[in-house]
Image (cartoon, rainbow, N blue to C red):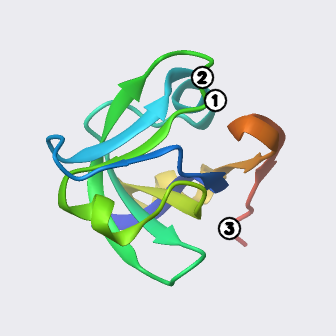
């Protein structure tokens, strides 16, 4: 049996742009993608810490080192530039995979840089 399990998380990144006329998705700095293990086209759940809005979308790769966290398409109406968001990425895992998995969490600092990296245990 496969279950959806937290794979990785980007914690409290700041939205850099909200682009409602752009084709939908979230654009994330390539460095953040690499450090988190998230990939282009992966599905993510985003939580806006300012207003409580939650929405799902898929990932576009942003310019490396740009700090980009851009919400595109209809979801752009749910955020404003400067809003802190949590980006949660899930993966389907077997019980055997789950037992070995430790989700990676990027704690975000100034300019959407990585301040710290944590892992969550599953016990």
According to the picture, the residue beneath numbered tag 2 turns out to be 31
> Residue 61 appears in which quarter of the rendering?
top left
- Please tell me how crowded label 3 is: few (under 14), some (14-19), or many (20+) other residues with Cα within 10 Å: few
Which of the two discs, 2 and 1, sits closer to the camera? 2
In percent of width and height, residue 68 lies at 52, 33
Q: Residue at x 52, y 31 (%)?
A: 33
The answer to whether the residues at label 2 and label 1 have Cβ atoms under 8 Å apart is yes
Pick the front one: 26 or 50: 50
According to the picture, the residue beneath numbered tag 3 turns out to be 122
Where, quadrant-wise, is the N terminus in this rendering? bottom left
Q: Which mark is first along the chain, 3 or 1?
A: 1
Residue 99 visible in this rendered orientation of the protein: yes
> Residue 112 appears in which quarter of the rendering?
top right
Pick the front one: 64 or 51: 51
Give left or right: position of 40 versus 84: left
According to the picture, the residue beneath numbered tag 1 turns out to be 35
Numbered badge on residue 64: none
């Amino acid at each position: 049996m496969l279950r959806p399990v937290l794979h990785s998380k980007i914690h409290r990144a700041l939205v850099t742009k909200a682009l409602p006329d752009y084709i939908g998705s979230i654009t994330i700095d390539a460095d953040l993608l690499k450090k988190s293990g998230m990939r282009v086209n992966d599905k993510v759940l985003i939580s806006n810490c300012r207003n409580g809005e939650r929405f799902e979308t898929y990932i576009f790769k942003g310019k490396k080192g740009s700090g980009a966290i851009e919400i595109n398409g209809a979801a752009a109406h749910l955020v404003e530039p400067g809003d802190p968001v949590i980006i949660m990425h899930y993966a389907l895992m077997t019980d055997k995979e789950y037992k070995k998995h430790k989700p990676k969490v990027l704690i975000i600092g100034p300019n959407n840089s990585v301040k710290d990296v944590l892992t969550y245990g599953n016990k």
